[in-house]
């Protein structure tokens, strides 16, 4: 596995752990369809949370948060519709979150959670 | 996260309007949005400001940034807002104390590396800031001398964003105040011609044209418009170029007015930005209407007529100008300002200038003497001068025909040559006399006094009018022409130190009015 994929995997694992810690219920991970992939699908009460995890080892190519554009957020919302269409659970509303995971000094990782970007 | 607020100035024509720059840094998708009726240059500020902030060693906020410029309905153009946008973003991201930037006004464009670059129109912008009680205005280093001309506020000259941020963090803007070195005088033996300083010419250079020199003196004393007709080589251009040397220096208020126009045009000399000499502009005869009275797409710029405000607008080879260009000078000649309307808005530029026209009698430009006779047909000659429209010439108070000087005239005239300084002294005294008479009125020179006042407050004794009656009766003198003649008569009286014009002055003024045979 390439180093960048490993970093991404690590980031997604950290993100899932973090979301569980703050009380979200993880429903699905790396869900794929023709339109793309959702990193994490979670439930926050009766709200469906579609989470995009961005992991970076540094900021030399921009911050992880900055890598999620408005266009990408719109695609995540479309993906949320696809996901909803593929199962029978009911949600009151849908929220798109971004989790920015970044390697900081001495190899430790920082997580920044921006809920409801759209 | 937070909202920060600071101030900037929008320029419309030569008037500054205060603009509030408000920045909100909030959670959400990372993006920077600029709102508030901006043009392309200003939308690009996003990229300039971002690079400048990052390259100055600050981090760009990883958040959703909204920059709003108020009032939102005022069209904003140009790059002068970069600095205000940058400091407001840094303050909203808590990298600067937000309360330190609320009151000062920030002007300047940002280079990608964080350098603060000069902008046009700093002088009128700083005047507006002073009127709004800004207290402190931060300007690019190159613009500091012109900003410092404005009394009543502290000018801070910043050359890089990093330097400026350091000062704001230490609350030490006042500690870096810029003061103009008052000992540096403008060079005296030079005068600005078309914005370029060159050696000052002198009236004594023009030998053999006593009539032209006298006409120049009268026009300088009264602020009258002048038309010189004559074959090539008679000294029309030389005479016109010497007009500024006869005019008194601009007073403080006029000087600021003139400098503000040139600041907007970007033609201020960098070392000594206060223009104290009356400007002299001689636009080329291919000039367009926009070049003459101002215009342009996007940011409206003043034209030659406004750049000659409180100075001399010289049109050499006047009949070669496009007729619509000449005729668009009629509004400023009457009112002293030009109003330019474009999609971007309507702008008023000051344009109170002395018009000096020079024309050859015909396109062949032969001197009309036996040695080089004119080869034009009468119709060609008529059509050539007809390009100067009647209404335009009706606004020209003094008209002179210049003839080639013979060898004897050239030699004998040498004894009567006076230097510019001598004539300028007489002009100054005549202007003082007029100014004392018009004390308490908005006018300073005879040319500015409205016709109604000439018939009431500053009435000329009726026995002095006799020489006008014939011309009025045969239609060669219009009602406006009468006003023009009376103004010149007042100037002649001022030059002769008489309390009021007598029939001699009125008659002489009429001769100057009719100076070109039609």
Image: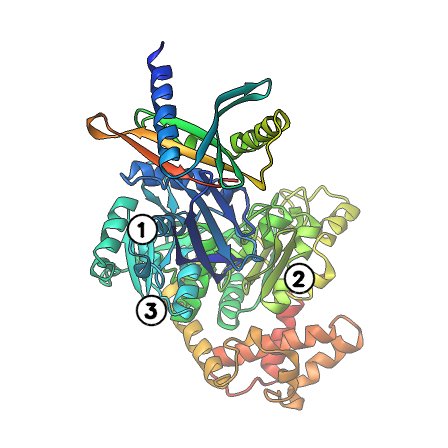
Q: Earlier in the sequence, mark 2 or mark 3?
A: 3
Q: CA distance from mark 2 to mark 3?
A: 35 Å
User: Please, is residue B59 above or below residue B262 in the view?
Assistant: above
Farthest residue to the top: give it: A1
Farthest residue to the front: give it: A89
Q: Are marks 1 and 3 on the same chain?
A: yes
User: Neighbour class for label 2 at 10 Å: few (<14), some, many (≥20)?
Assistant: some
User: Please, is residue B28 above or below residue A89 in the view?
Assistant: below
State the residue position of label 3: B151
On residue B94, the disc is 1
Q: Earlier in the sequence, mark 1 or mark 3?
A: 1
Q: Earlier in the sequence, mark 1 or mark 2?
A: 1
User: Neighbour class for label 1 at 10 Å: few (<14), some, many (≥20)?
Assistant: some
Q: Is residue B485 visible in this depiction of the protein?
A: yes
State the residue position of label 2: B330
Q: Is residue B239 visible in this depiction of the protein?
A: no
Q: CA distance from mark 1 to mark 2?
A: 56 Å
């Amino acid at each position: 596995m390439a180093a960048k994929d490993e970093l991404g995997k690590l980031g997604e694992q950290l993100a899932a752990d973090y979301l569980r810690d703050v009380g979200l219920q993880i429903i699905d991970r790396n869900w794929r369809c023709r339109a793309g992939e959702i990193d994490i699908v979670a439930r926050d009460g009766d709200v469906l949370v579609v989470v995009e995890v961005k992991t970076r080892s540094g900021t030399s190519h921009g911050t992880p948060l900055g890598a999620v554009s408005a266009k990408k957020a719109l695609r995540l919302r479309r993906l949320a519709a696809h996901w909803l269409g593929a199962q029978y659970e009911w949600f009151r509303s849908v929220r798109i979150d971004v989790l920015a995971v970044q390697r900081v000094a001495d190899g430790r990782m920082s997580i920044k959670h921006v809920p409801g970007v759209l | 996260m937070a909202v920060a607020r600071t101030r900037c100035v929008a320029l419309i024509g030569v008037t500054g309007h205060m603009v509030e720059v408000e920045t909100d840094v909030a959670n959400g998708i990372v993006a920077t949005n600029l709102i508030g009726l901006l043009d392309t240059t200003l939308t690009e500020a996003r990229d300039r400001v971002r690079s400048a902030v990052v390259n100055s060693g600050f981090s760009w906020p990883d958040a959703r940034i909204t920059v709003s410029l108020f009032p939102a309905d005022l069209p904003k153009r140009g790059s002068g807002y970069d600095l205000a946008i940058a400091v407001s973003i840094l303050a909203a991201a808590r990298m600067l104390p937000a309360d330190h930037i609320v009151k000062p006004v920030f002007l300047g464009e940002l280079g990608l590396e964080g350098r603060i670059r000069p902008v046009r129109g700093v002088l009128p912008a700083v005047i507006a800031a002073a009127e709004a009680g800004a207290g402190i205005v931060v300007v690019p280093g190159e613009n500091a001398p012109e900003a410092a001309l404005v009394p009543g506020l502290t000018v801070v000259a910043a050359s890089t964003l990093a330097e400026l941020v350091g000062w704001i963090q230490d609350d030490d803007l006042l500690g870096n105040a810029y003061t103009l070195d008052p000992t540096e005088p403008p060079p005296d033996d030079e005068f600005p011609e078309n914005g370029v300083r060159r050696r000052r010419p002198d009236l004594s250079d023009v030998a053999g044209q006593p009539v032209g020199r006298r006409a120049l003196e009268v026009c300088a004393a009264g602020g009258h418009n002048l038309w010189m007709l004559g074959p090539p080589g008679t000294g029309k251009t030389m005479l016109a170029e010497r007009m500024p040397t006869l005019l008194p220096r601009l007073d403080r208020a006029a000087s600021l007015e003139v400098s503000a126009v040139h600041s907007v045009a970007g033609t201020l000399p960098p070392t000594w930005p206060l223009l104290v000499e009356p400007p002299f502009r001689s636009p080329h005869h291919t000039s367009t209407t926009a070049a003459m009275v101002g215009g342009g797409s996007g940011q409206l710029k003043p034209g030659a007529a406004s750049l000659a405000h409180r100075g001399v607008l010289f049109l050499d080879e006047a009949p070669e100008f496009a007729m619509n260009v000449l005729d668009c000078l009629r509004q400023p000649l009457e009112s002293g300002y030009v109003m330019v309307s474009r999609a971007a808005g309507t702008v008023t530029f000051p344009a109170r200038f002395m018009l000096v026209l020079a024309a050859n009698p015909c396109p062949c430009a032969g001197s009309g003497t036996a040695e080089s006779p004119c080869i034009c047909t009468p119709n060609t000659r008529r059509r050539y001068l007809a390009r100067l429209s009647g209404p335009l010439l009706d606004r020209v108070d003094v008209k002179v025909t210049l003839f080639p000087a013979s060898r004897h005239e050239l030699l004998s005239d040498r004894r009567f040559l006076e230097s510019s300084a001598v004539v300028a002294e007489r002009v100054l005294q005549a202007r003082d006399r007029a100014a004392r008479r018009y004390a308490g009125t908005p006018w300073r020179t005879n040319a500015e006094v409205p016709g109604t006042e000439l018939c009431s407050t500053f009435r000329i004794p009726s026995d002095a009018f006799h020489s006008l009656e014939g011309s009025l009766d045969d239609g060669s003198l219009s009602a406006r022409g009468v006003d023009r003649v009376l103004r010149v008569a007042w100037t002649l009286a001022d030059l002769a130190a008489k309390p009021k014009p007598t029939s001699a002055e009125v008659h002489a003024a009429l001769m100057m009015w009719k100076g070109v045979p039609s």
